[in-house]
Amino acid sequence: VFHANPSLLDLVAEIMGDAPRLAEHLSHSPALLDYVLAPEFYVPIGDLKSLQADLNRALKATESFEALLDACRRWANELRFRVGVQTLRRMIDPLRAAEHFTAIAETAIREMVPCVYDEFVAQFGSVSNANFVILGYGKLGSFELTPVSDLDLVLVYEASMDAISKGGPKALPAPAYFIRLTQ
């Protein structure tokens, strides 16, 4: 691969020498080298709508909930690596990179919450007349995520305190239901 693509060797050397976190990521996922060869790798990532469409394509190819989670993780890690390399190569500035990291996280959250909820409902049913929303705080909320930022998420729900979930093999009181859903 390196013989046929000398620029790839230059990139790997640059990553290994200048970006230890990217190097570690590459060492855990050597398949990323194939991604680096794709023409779109050096193009800045798209907006939320195009990211959602891209993630949806990746998720549709899955057959189980665990595979869905793995596909989302892989998708996000590949894009984060792409943004990291683009930043290292000064193709985008750190402020733009923060916006991209935030867009990746926001897309993953938006697309995965319904999937996680559906899986949760299959196990515990649903709480009637309940609603919830997820809020992003910290760097996620201010569009300043970095490659090492954690996601500060809060789930706020509205439900009767004495409600119990119905329709699944197991039932939970509303507070326990939403605590577990959040986890």
Image (spheres, grey):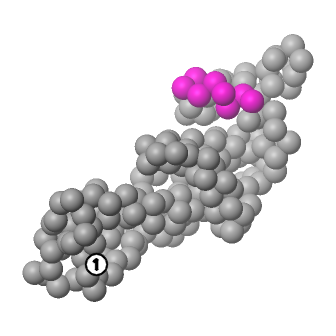
Q: Nearer the viewer, residue 41 or 141?
A: 41
Q: Residue at x 69, y 68 (%)?
A: 49
Query: What is the x, y in percent for residue 4?
Result: 89, 18
144 to 42, vertically: above or below: below
**Residue 136 in the image: x percent, y percent?**
43, 69
Q: Element type at marker 1?
A: strand
Q: Would residue 165 be found to the left or right of residue 120 on screen?
A: left
Q: Which one is nearer the viewer's eye here, 50 or 84?
A: 50
**Residue at coordinates 53% horizontally, 63% vertically from top-left?**
111
The answer to which quarter of the image holds residue 27 is top right
- Across and down, in percent, residue 173 comes to 13, 71
Is the N terminus in the top left, top right, bottom left or bottom right quadrant?
top right
- Residue at 78% in and 43% down: 41
Q: Main secondary structure of the magenta part?
A: helix
Residue under pointer 1: 157
Left or right of 120, for residue 41: right
Amino acid type at image mark 1: Tyr
Q: Could you say which quadrant of the image residue 36 lies in? A: top right
Q: Is residue 29 magenta?
A: yes
Q: Residue sitting at 38 percent across and 64 percent down?
A: 117
- Let me know if residue 31 is in the magenta part: yes
Image check: 108 left or right of 37?
Answer: left
Res 181 → quadrant: bottom left
The answer to whether any part of residue 86 appears in the image is: yes
Q: Position of residue 133 (x, y in %)?
A: 38, 76
Where are the magenta residues, as a range? 27-34
Image quadrant in which the C terminus is located? bottom left
